[in-house]
Every structure is written in C-alpha cells, then in structure tokens.
Amino acid sequence: MANNGSSGNGTTGHLGGELFKAMTGVDIVHVPYKGSAQAINDLIGGQIEVMFDNVPSIGPHVKAGRVRGLGVSAPKRAASFPDIPTIAEAGVPGYETNSWGGIIGPARLPREVVQRLCIPRSKPRWPYRRWWSAIGPSTATSTAARPRNSSRSCAARRLSGRT
C-alpha cells in the first residue's frame, strides 16, 4: 500500500492517483492536503510515499534530488525532464492526465476586461511561453469565448471504461 498525497480532493493529483490505481490495481490510499506545498513537504519527509503533482511545483525538488520523478502523466515527456519516461512508457499503456490553468473571473465580468486579459490567438509568441516551457509544462492558447478543454477528460473516459 502507498499513500498518495495531493493538494486536495478532486484535484489532478487526486484523480491521477485514482486513475493509476484503477489501471494498475496498485493499492493507493488518497491523503488530501490543503495545498501542494504541504504534501510535497511530507513526500520529502517520508510521511507519504507517492504524489501525482504538476511539474512547476514538484520539478525543483526533482532537480535538487529531494524526490525522484518516476513518470510524466502527459502523452509526451516533459521538455524539462527528458530522462523521465511517460507513465505509459513506464508500463501503464494509455495512462494520461492533463490539467490546465487560466485566468478566472466572476460570471458577469465585463467584456472589455475579459478582452484586455486574454491573449489573442493571433499572437503565438506569448512572451512567457519560453519561461513557462523551461519550468516544465507544455502550453496552448485559447480564447475566452472558446476555452480549450483538453481535460474533458481522458481520465474521466478511462475511469468510466470509455476510451
């Protein structure tokens, strides 16, 4: 049995662990924390055995040797960790999870504010793309009107038996 620390119930780390458990039969117990930092501290300290976390938060600890990266949940290896295989490559064919981050506002946020905050698709050279890619995650742009929903979710499809 392994304790899987995550940044909370329903997070990518929680659901990624549940998907791994469902696909492998490994006995994993979810341990929800109030944020990734607390879970990472306990992972480093040995209070939990495993964590499914995102590259920007766990990556510095992998690079420093405080934790060991075992697999990447994306369909391709992370550019910042080319020696870490995907979980599918490591022996769990079809395993893949994704998460996304974005700018979120109230439902009635004025259109002018939304347009000022959004990066137009016509500007593919987003100034932070190089920096963001260097710390790990891949990037994709979308618009406020049509947010990219890549997480509609292969994890949900796999857990329900649909592929």
Image (cartoon, helix red, strand yellow):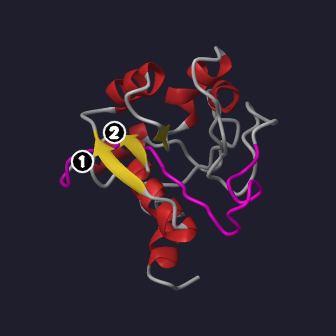
- Quadrant where the C terminus is found in the figure: bottom right
Left or right of 6 on screen, residue 63:
right
Q: Label 2's element?
A: loop
Q: CA gap, disc 2 to disc 1?
A: 32 Å
Residue tagged 1: 110
Does the magenta portion include 97? yes
Left or right of 159 on screen, residue 125:
right
- In terms of image quadrants, where is residue 45? top left
* Picture layout, residue 35 above or below residue 45: below
Residue with the most extreme bottom position: 162
Residue 97 x, y percent position in the rendering: 55, 58
Confirm or deny contact between disc 2 and disc 1 (CB under 8 A): no
Residue at 49% x, 40% y: name it: 50
Residue 58 visible at all: yes
Nearer to us in this view, 19 or 105: 19
Q: Label 1's element?
A: loop
Residue at 70% x, 26% y: name it: 134
Which mark, residue 40?
Answer: none
Residue 62 x, y percent position in the rendering: 63, 24
Nearer to us in this view, 101 or 119: 101
Residue 17 x, y percent position in the rendering: 46, 54
Does the magenta portion include 140? no
Residue type (three-letter) at the residue carrying disc 2? Ser
Residue type (three-letter) at the residue carrying disc 1? Pro
Instruction: Give the number of marks.
Output: 2
Which badge, 2 or 1, is on the more N-terminal residue? 2
* Region rendered in magenta: 85-108
Residue tagged 2: 7
Nearer to us in this view, 73 or 100: 73
Residue at 52% x, 76% y: name it: 158
Mark 2 or 1, closer to the camera: 2
Residue 26 x, y percent position in the rendering: 51, 60
